[in-house]
Amino acid sequence: MKISKNEPILKAPSAILFLIGLMVIIHITFNKILPPELGVSLFLKMAFVPADFSQGHKLWTLVSYAFLHASWEHLLMNMVWLLAFGSAVAKRMGNAKIYLLFFLICCVIAIQVQFFFSQETSVPIIGASGGVAAMLGAAARFAFSGDILASSNRRTRLLPLRKVFTNGTTLVFVLLWVVLNVLFGLISVSPGGASVSVAWQAHLGGFFAGLLLVGWFENPPLSPSGGPGNVDFGEWSGARTHKNKR
């Protein structure tokens, strides 16, 4: 993997720093600032409770649940993964607002998948794990397809969806991630050991949301020929290649 010397490897994108900072502030507020009774009441109002949502209540929790964490360990693990994979995705998108929209949409899809499997439960579901999983899914579309360069016009193209399951490295990554999450779900292991956290179904929902939707949110890089980089040479102009008959 080739990385440009000008790429600020240790400098996280502003969108990632914003998300991490916001989630840390929220966690500190609930654990150190708010009175216990008020903190618990507000926490339950922001957590996603499938039984409440099925009644059409607390629709805002489709997003707010992702900013709550059960413990510092839970928060730290999610933020480390967000910093690692979210930074790569955010750098490709370039625009902080577009990245944040992508992250939030993936969080909504992740919790909807979880809701499908647990519509009657009253157990609060929290954590950014679904959105973080989406960053891994998005990264799978470009991390194994070639060199990564700093310039937005020269970075690697996204792997087409039709090739995700034919590219050996990408396929192994996807299958391994799916199997591990299913196993964790079957043995009831949750991030950070917390009893209330995003379940494995939400992880899978977020992962595949990122995998499928990343192409709709990033600006495709330019190919050496000057056309959009997510298509092969010559395809961008709509013309078929012909032999030079000079």
Image (cartoon, rainbow, N blue to C red):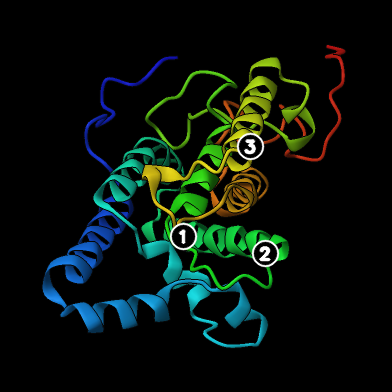
* Residue annotated with mark 3: 227
Marks 1 and 2 sit apart, C-alpha to C-alpha, by 30 Å
Q: Where residue 131 appears, x then y in whole percent? A: 49, 53
Tell me if 117 is positioned left or right of 173 in this view.
right
Question: Callout 3 environment at 10 Å: few (<14), some (14 to 19), or many (20+)?
Answer: some
Residue 175 percent location from the top left of the image: 68, 27
User: The residue under label 2 is which amino acid type?
Assistant: Ser
Of labels 1 and 2, earlier in sequence is 1
The residue nearer to you, when weighing 6 against 39, is: 39
Image quadrant where residue 37 sits: bottom left
Label 2 Cα neighbours within 10 Å, binned few <14 / some 14-19 / many ≥20: some
**Badge 1, how many Cα within 10 Å: few under 14, some, many 20+?**
some
Callout 3: SS? loop
- Closer to the camera, 35 or 66? 35
**Residue type at tag 1:** Ile
**Residue named by callout 2:** 118
- Name the mark on residue 145: none
Query: Which of label 3 and label 1 is nearer to you?
Result: 1
Helix, strand or loop under label 2: loop
**Separation of marks 2 and 3 at Cα, in angstroms:** 46 Å
Residue at the location (22% across, 32% down)?
10
Task: Give left or right: position of 129 versus 235.
Answer: left
Considering only order in the chain, which callout, 3 or 2, is on the residue closer to the N terminus?
2
Image quadrant holding the N terminus, namely top left
Is residue 122 shown above or below 201? Answer: below
- In the figure, 32 relative to 169: above or below? below
Residue contact between numbered discs 3 and 1, judged by CB atoms under 8 Å? no
Which residue corresponds to mark 1? 98
